[in-house]
Amino acid sequence: MCQLFVGADPALWENETRSLRMDGMATSVRLEAFFWSVLEDVGIRDQLSVSQLLQRLYDESLDEGHDLDNFASFLRVCCGRYLALQLSGDLPSDTAVALRDVDAAGILARENSRRKPQSKAVSRQHSEAGMQTQ
């Protein structure tokens, strides 16, 4: 099983630091090459450079009230969600479809509806386990 992962190109997990300007200030972001590749794919969908994409993600996250103390972790999660949404069929894998044109509200609603029954089952299991130990 692990050969699938350990046999992959080691270049995928090599760290890469990129310098960019965000809000006019020079900064740098360090991610593994794999994540930079995914961010490039995301940007291409909306004709954005990686720098432009990161600026947009940063700005929109702040607008939503998110605390981005660990921006690199946020970017890794964005990459994972992008790939997972493609695998689930919620996000078209056709890169000609711009992300700005997808029904984000509908995708989030479907995600939440799938997660609710799961979280209720976990809550019920925790409650039942607590009752058994009493």
Image (cartoon, rainbow, N blue to C red):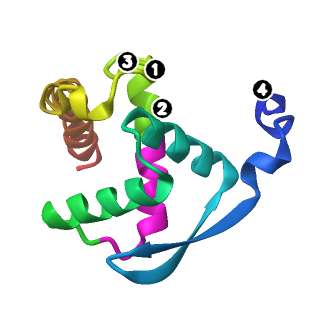
Secondary structure, mark 1, is: helix
| Residue lying at 32% horizontally and 71% vertically, measured from the top left | 68
Q: Which residue is mark 2?
A: 83
Residue 118 drawn above or below residue 87: below
- Left or right for 86, reference 131: right
Secondary structure, mark 2, is: helix
Q: Main secondary structure of the magenta part?
A: helix
Residue density around tag 1, few if under 14, some if 14–19, many if 20 or more, within 10 Å = few
Label 2 or label 4, whichever lies nearer to me, is: 2
Label 1 or label 3, whichever lies nearer to me, is: 3
Residue 73 drawn above or below residue 87: below
> Tag on residue 87?
1
Label 3 or label 2, whichever lies nearer to me, is: 3
Query: How many angstroms separate mark 3 from mark 4 (CA)?
Result: 29 Å
Task: Report if residue 48 lies within the magenta region.
Answer: no
- Left or right for 59, reference 53: left
